Amino acid sequence: MVRRMIPAAVSDPPPSAAASARRFSGHGLVCIRGERIVFANLNLTLAPGEALLLLGPNGSGKSSLLRLMAGLLRPAAGSLAWDDGPVREDPERHHARTRYVGHTDTIKPVLTARENLAFWAKVCANEDDTRATLQARTDAALDRLALARLADVPGRMLSAGQKRRLNLARLLAAPAPLWLMDEPTTALDKGSVATLEAIMAEHRATGGMIALSTHLDVNLPGARVLNLDDFAVDAATAYGLHEDRHPEDLRA
Ligand SMILES: Nc1ncnc2c1ncn2[C@@H]1O[C@H](COP(=O)(O)OP(=O)(O)OP(=O)(O)O)[C@@H](O)[C@H]1O
């Protein structure tokens, strides 16, 4: 059952947030994993307030695209850019603007939920963030994801859904405009999915951007759909590239 597209207008972000937000885009992207071309000629854009829903069957490249957008994988061809410059020219600036929530949790088992989150808030802090600001963000994030009563529980003792909520809490404890989310509803109960949907709507309403992969039901009003199947190449091309063709040959 899929309830992916809910055709409601996305409200305009407040002027202050929109003014500081940037547009993000990818052009002519080619992704190779192992010796297989996963997708080619893929273009995307995300403006402040927008969301992109990545769809496609297992293995079509949704996770690969998110990792590529996060700067964790390099495209074999094509480029990613903010409207003030290519990602490759300033990877640190890109990382400061991006938060990636992947399949695997990044929770340190011996640290408590609060310590895990405080660590992330500190690692991603701006130089003008005070200790009090970081603590307030951490506490607010714990509250919002219904983790306050688990704040002192070590990461190793959290359930799968609680770990997922803690990973999502990083988005609030360490704010950034572009959220890249790989099947973020995995292991969440219904109430937590509703909380996540509300958090994503608030993020977009203040000029944030989201790219999200899912096989399930996610309420992301007005999201544009990017079906990875549309960028697949035929099997002979996909596996034959390394022999006699250069990835640039795949660009339109
Ligand atoms: N670490 C890796 N090394 C080599 N190939 C990989 C690696 N990870 C993924 N792949 C391959 O890349 C292709 C795309 O995988 P990816 O995980 O991006 O797909 P997906 O659409 O996210 O799949 P799913 O819906 O199952 O999560 C697959 O053919 C997969 O086998």
Image (cartoon, rainbow, N blue to C red):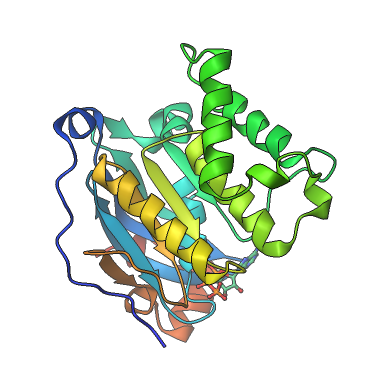
Above or below residue 15? Residue 170 is below
Q: Is residue 125 above or below residue 14?
A: above
Residue located 55% across and 45% down the image: 169
Q: For the view shown, which residue lies furthest in the bottom direction?
A: 1
- Specify whether 56 is left or right of 161: left
157 vs 227, nearest the viewer: 157
Image quadrant where one finds the C terminus: bottom left
The image shows residue 18, relative to residue 183, as above or below, that is above
Residue 63 image offset from top left, x and y in percent: 52, 63
Residue at (25% x, 35% y) in the render: 22
Query: At which x and y percent is residue 100?
Result: 51, 48
View quadrant of ligand 1: bottom right
- The residue drawn where x is 52% and y is 62% is 192
Q: Which image quarter: residue 151? A: top right
Left or right: residue 104 versus residue 186 is right
User: Residue 97 appears at what percent x and percent y?
Assistant: 41, 34
Q: Nearer the viewer, residue 124 or 218?
A: 218
The reply to whether residue 115 is in sight is yes
Q: Residue at x 65, y 62 (%)?
A: 161
Q: How many marks?
A: 0
Name the spot of residue 1 as percent of width and height, x first: 42, 88
Q: Observer-nearest residue: 95 or 207?
A: 207
One can see residue 71 in this view: no
